[in-house]
Amino acid sequence: MDTDLWANIQPGEELLAARGITKRFANGVLANDHVDFDIRAQEVHALLGENGAGKTTLMNILFGYLQPDEGQIYLRGRPVRFNSPQDALRHGIGMVHQYRKLVPAHTVLENIILGHPKARGVINERRAAEEIAALAESYGFRIDLKAYVWQLTEGERQVVEIIKALYRGAHILIMDEPTSALTPTETEQLLQAIERMTSSNLGVVPFITHKLPVVLRISHRVSILRRGRIVATLKTAETNERELARLLVGRDVIFDVKKPPQEPGEPVLELQNVSALSDKGTPALRDVSFTLREGQILGIAGVLGNGQHELAEVIAGLRPVESGRILFRGQDITRAPVLERWRMGIGYTPAERTEVGSIPDFSLVENVALNHFWDRQYVRSGFLDYGRLRSLTRNILDEFKVVAAGPEARGKTLSGGNLQKVIMGRVLARKPRLLVANLPAQGLDIGAIEFVQQQLLAARSQGTAIILISEDLDEILMLSDIIAPMYEGQIMALLKAEEADRETVGTLIAGGQVRRSAG
């Protein structure tokens, strides 16, 4: 690294600038259209945009993953070209990815020093551990360097990514969706660390697509990217949530979706003292019991890692039950396989869009077929009827406003939000009697969140029973008919929507005393 390049940095100085950046892809998508963007010392510059607006493309250009078709990048006023991420790293640019670039089977220390120039010869692990520990402490990070990455929470993995970038000498830190998978406590710790970084002349770009309160709290400037173009750059202190939301989607956004009153119907799902284990073999669910009726939304509230994920998998048939029973419309399905549950009318949208919910190298038609391959309507003479599946896929793309090149586009070419729309669309196309929605709005932009919430309420109005798992307490309170706070694998209470509030639910998800329970 050219150390002279980063000498004598002045507060507010322009560190990195992109001028006239344009990028077109072979499928005809214009991802960036003459974009101007800059990063200054001691500043957090937030980049906002809807899913598919071109944010990731711009950041990948700044980090050397992609080359612009037009435009120029400047580093402290000097024109530069990053031919690879390694080239960007050598120039002091670091990136923390939304999807972690870590090796789960290695320790934290091994992941941080992996690929570092100091690791090319004989590695002095003790010295490296001391240097990394001192670096982490200077920014208020606490991490066990001997722990294996697979043992860490999402927040801890993100800390590893940040420390890895800083240990390589990053002076500019690009952060992709930095708070999308963090608990409130982890989010607060990250924001405090970002404040320490900027005070030491680092430039930080946490581009956040949906958590506007975080943008308003941490950033100094915010730029809005819509359909590949910067439509506004504002001082954060001079704007608000509603203005940012309007600029994001090009219209006013409804922050408070109205849930119409509705009488619940017959019982659809009943859990009777269900217990299950985690992937590590430890108790994840402990005697969970509840009944869910037609046209009801049961909101599962809790901090990540308290059994919500295992609950979703147990109901979907992806995780075995250790004890207890699951009844679907009166029928015992405790040991029923996944396909049988699909056929009975149980739909599932997983939190892991790329690992579980889709196959990235498959076309959208093939990904939609994952929920329909056994249906006679889409099978002809023992083979998939691609004509009908293509028509169904096209309808989903249109109805759910998915930004994609078409039904034949590969899943990996879609943004996370657009892929989520496809997954939800293919499940709702079956009009399920029960929908298990696990973090359906995680990582989505404001407009997509509003759309997903409206789809859930539309399914509810048609009699679908819905289990909504969300870490957004406001979303749980707004959409749910019954709220079930979870703590350490237990449902702490079943609260009617009208008797639930942030204080009560917040106390329960932290393991506090149960106050009231719904009948």
Image (cartoon, rainbow, N blue to C red):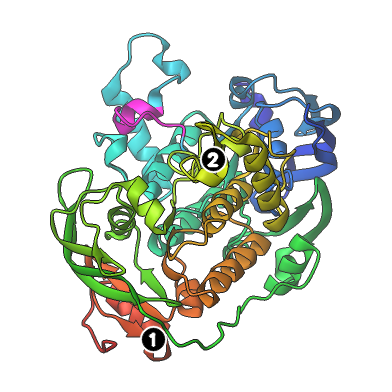
Asked if 414 appears above or below 114 in the picture, the reply is below
In the image, residue 507 above or below residue 270: below
- Numbered label attached to residue 126: none
| Res. 292 image quadrant | bottom left
Q: Residue at x 55, y 55 (%)?
A: 424
Q: Which residues fall within the magenta stretch?
A: 101-112
Name the disc covering residue 369, or none: 2
To which quarter of the image does residue 68 belong? top right
Q: Amino acid at mark 1?
A: Ala
Q: CA distance from mark 1 to mark 2?
A: 40 Å
Q: Which of 330 and 395 lies nearest the eye of the viewer?
A: 330
Percent x, y of residue 268? 34, 71
User: Which residue is more in the foreground, 319 or 382?
Assistant: 382
Q: Quadrant of the N terminus?
A: top right
Which residue shows up at 72% across the image and 50% down it? 12
- Pick whichever, 38 or 373, lies toward us: 373
**Residue 104 lies in the magenta-colored region:** yes
Reply yes or no: does residue 156 show up in magenta. no
Left or right, residue 486 beside residue 274: right
The residue located at (26%, 74%) in the rendering is: 290
Q: Nearer the viewer, residue 464 or 445?
A: 464
- Name the image quarter holding the C terminus: bottom left
Residue at image mark 1? 500
Residue furthest out toward the left = 323
